[in-house]
Image (cartoon, grey):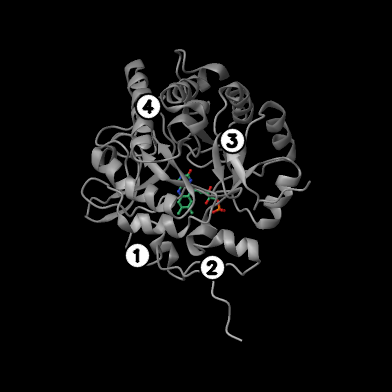
């Protein structure tokens, strides 16, 4: 029997109306002060609840985990209460939603994180993040040199992830996706160039993946493994000056060890700003060591998603930018309706701003005959 991405599927006991997911996308539209999720965000997510699963924008688990101004947190009661209106709106519209739990690590600045950013080692590559400008207002600023995490920092961070996961359950999310991609905290532990530690969290491949594995275990113990997912990006160089010749091997070893944990899914981010192409051999190696659900994202089209499903390379397909300008994306794909492009000024409305470029993209309307 052939499958399509429009089929029903389940994540553990969680039924999804299709294999189509909305990829996590930072849109920086929280209410201030306090970076609180609001009614406009609930409208935005509800408009896109035609996806089988929505993954929220990256959501910092603590103040020091922040790397971008205006992103929503999940570490205060106001955050939890704000997110409740989002999860309710998505559920009312018939979809499910995971929160993406985020610690940016070194991709930050003290003016955003409230203290010197944390990382495996005091190492940084040239990099810019969205934060307060010295002359006032917001813009891109060079990241700070991070501080090497102590054992205490690692223990505290695992505790913060666990608390954030419990908060996510209170807020009504169906699960959490741990962000271990794109040069953020966990990715810098996995990479050789950013992890120069000589303790049990650095050196060998097994040591470099230890912090991620310990965090996943702790979060699974707290909320149940079928509610826990992870995002990885071994073919993305974002956040690093150079590619790492061991990152694919470390990733395969890590997912092999994740297999018995029975996570909700593992999610590969591909094809963002700095990347190398993913060879089919990698997808085959992943399938060989990982029997659970696999999600992919990155410049997907209906045709290549269907082809990856037919080859057995992936089970869930996340669309990012197409969901920005097509709130009804799953319906358009299903009915073969044309996709809308960004507005001309979309680059200004992706991150931050008001309703424009956020909740005012229309659903498809058939041309009048
Ligand atoms: C505006 C914007 C914000 C994004 N924010 C996040 C994020 O918070 N977390 C994350 O893991 N990926 C983020 N991404 C990457 C997307 O999840 C996705 O992997 C990427 O856009 C490629 O998919 P696409 O070609 O379908 O857009 C973002 C992408 C865009 C365009």
Q: Which mark is residue 162?
A: 4
Q: Respond yes or no on whether mark 3 lies under 8 Å from ligand 1.
A: no
Q: Give the distance between the C-alpha atoms of the residues marked 4 and 3, in whole angstroms.
A: 25 Å
Of circles 3 and 1, which is in front? 1
State the residue position of label 3. Answer: 234
As measured in the structure, the alpha-carbon distance from the residue carrying label 4 to the one carrying label 2 is: 39 Å
The residue nearer to you, when weighing 246 against 31, is: 31
Query: Which tag is nearer the camera, tag 4 or tag 2?
Result: 4
Comparing labels 4 and 3, the label whose residue is closer to the camera: 4
- Badge 3 marks a residue whose secondary structure is loop
User: Which numbered disc covers residue 341?
Assistant: 2
Residue on which disc 1 sits: 355
Other-residue count near label 1 (Cα within 10 Å), few / some / many at <14 / 14–19 / ≥20? some
Check the image and name the residue furthest to the right: 1
Q: Name the element at disc 2.
A: loop
Q: Say if 196 sits above or below 362 in the image.
A: above
At 40% from the left and 58% from the top, the residue drawn is 44
Regarding residue 71, the answer to whether it shows in the image is no
Task: Give the structural element (helix, strand or loop) at label 1.
Answer: loop
Picture coordinates of residue 153, whole percent (x, y): 33, 21
Upstream in sequence: badge 4 or badge 1:
4
- Apparent side of residue 63 relative to residue 203 in the rendered image (left or right): left
For the residues marked 3 and 2, what is the alpha-carbon distance in whole angstroms?
Answer: 29 Å
Lower position in the chain sequence, tag 4 or tag 2: 4
């Amino acid at each position: 029997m052939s499958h399509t991405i429009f089929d029903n599927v389940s994540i553990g006991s969680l039924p999804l109306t299709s294999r189509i997911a909305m990829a996590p996308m930072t849109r920086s539209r929280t209410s201030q002060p306090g970076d609180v999720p609001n009614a406009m965000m609930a409208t935005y997510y509800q408009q896109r609840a035609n996806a089988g699963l929505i993954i929220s924008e990256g959501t910092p688990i603590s103040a020091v985990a922040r790397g971008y101004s205006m992103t929503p947190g999940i570490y205060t009661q106001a955050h939890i209460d704000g997110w409740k209106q989002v999860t309710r709106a998505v559920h009312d519209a018939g979809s499910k939603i995971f929160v993406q739990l985020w610690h940016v690590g070194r991709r930050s600045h003290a003016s955003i994180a409230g203290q010197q950013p944390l990382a495996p080692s005091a190492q940084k590559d040239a990099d810019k993040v969205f934060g307060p400008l010295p002359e006032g207002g917001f813009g891109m600023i060079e990241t700070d040199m991070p501080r090497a995490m102590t054992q205490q920092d690692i223990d505290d961070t695992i505790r913060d992830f666990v608390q954030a996961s419990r908060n996510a359950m209170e807020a009504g999310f169906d699960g959490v996706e741990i962000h271990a991609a794109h040069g953020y905290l966990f990715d810098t532990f996995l990479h050789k160039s950013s992890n120069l530690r000589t303790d049990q969290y650095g050196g060998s491949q097994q040591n470099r993946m230890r912090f991620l594995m310990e965090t996943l275990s702790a979060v699974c113990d707290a909320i149940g493994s079928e509610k826990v997912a992870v995002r990885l990006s071994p073919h993305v160089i974002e956040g690093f000056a150079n590619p790492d010749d061991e990152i694919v091997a470390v990733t395969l070893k890590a997912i092999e060890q994740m297999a018995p944990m029975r996570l909700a899914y593992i999610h590969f981010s591909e094809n963002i700003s700095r990347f190398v192409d993913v060879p089919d051999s990698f997808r085959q190696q992943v399938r060989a060591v990982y029997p659970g659900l696999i999600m992919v994202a990155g410049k997907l089209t209906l045709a290549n998603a269907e082809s990856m499903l037919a080859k057995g390379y992936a089970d869930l397909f996340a669309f990012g930018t197409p969901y920005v300008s097509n709130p009804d994306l799953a319906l358009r794909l299903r009915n073969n309706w044309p996709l809308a492009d960004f507005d001309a000024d979309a680059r200004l409305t992706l991150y931050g701003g008001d309703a424009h470029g956020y909740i005012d993209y229309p659903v498809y309307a058939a041309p009048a005959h």
